[in-house]
Image (spheres, grey):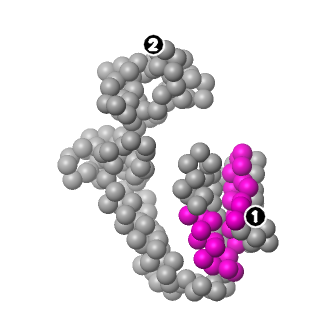
Amino acid sequence: EQVVPDEEAIWRTDDEAIASLDVPQYDIAPGEIVEARLYNGSIAECIVEEDLTLKLKSSGKPVRALAVMRPGGEDLMRVREGSPLPTKDGLPTRPNVLMFGDYGVKCDRIDEQSERFQAWLQKVPKDGKLVIIEVGAGTAVQTIRYIGENTAKLYPNSTFIRVNLEDASVSGLPSSRTISIEGLGALAALTAIDAQM
């Protein structure tokens, strides 16, 4: 077993700060009428579908939204004002996820995490027995899939495990170094992996 002995390389999460966030309950229901802020900046009335996606009320066309609100209500996709993790500009904290066409995203934390990830990888010996577990990365936007597979290619003794309900196939790596777990949810798959350790 090889371990990188660097406490600062461990990615920590402040559980107390996260637990103290005042997050609206995202409890929209199928058939409900909501307002959505679209990527062009406009607000449109939408109908919530059975799978909780949105369709324009006027045309039935599927839409992707930057914000979802009950009519006249708050944005259900942002932390409320007064959050213990406020942004520098005083706006409500938003998810640390870059979405398509989202020009308001603050990349500071994303960039910092990427730099820490790269610094950590530099400390892992090239002949290290690294296990990479990728959970739930889909095929529509394959960024995470590429990162996982390319990292496995850098470490010839690594094992790459892909967990995905619908498509856990892996290409570009020898099958002797890959494990595909399909048809299981994340918790069930991780529990099964843990039981084998």
Residue at image point 36% right, 43% down: 102
- Residue under numbered circle 2: 58
Q: 95 left or right of 4?
A: left
Residue at image point 34% right, 57% down: 107
Q: Nearer the viewer, residue 74 or 140?
A: 140
Q: Judge whether 74 appears above or below 83 on screen.
A: above
Residue at image point 47% right, 19% down: 56
Q: Which mark is residue 179?
A: 1
**Helix, strand or loop at mark 2:** loop
Quadrant (top left, top right, bottom left, bottom right) of the C terminus: bottom right
Q: CA distance from mark 1 to mark 2?
A: 46 Å
Q: 9 left or right of 128?
A: left
Residue 83 at x, y percent in the picture: 29, 47
Check disc 2 and give the amino acid type.
Ser
Q: Judge whether 8 appears above or below 49 on screen.
A: below
Indicate yes or no whether the magenta region holds residue 157: yes
Q: 155 left or right of 61?
A: right
Check disc 1 and give the amino acid type.
Ile
Residue 31 at x, y percent in the picture: 54, 17
Residue 104 at x, y percent in the picture: 30, 45
The crowding category of the residue bearing disc 2, from other C-alpha atoms within 10 Å (few below 14, some 14 to 19, many at least 20), is: few
**Helix, strand or loop at mark 1:** strand
Segment tinted magenta in the rendering? 147-172
Residue, far top: 58
Indicate yes or no whether the magenta region holds residue 59: no
Residue, far left: 89
Residue 126 at x, y percent in the picture: 60, 85
Q: Earlier in the sequence, mark 1 or mark 2?
A: 2
Q: Nearer the viewer, residue 157 or 48?
A: 157
Instruction: Report the number of discs.
Output: 2
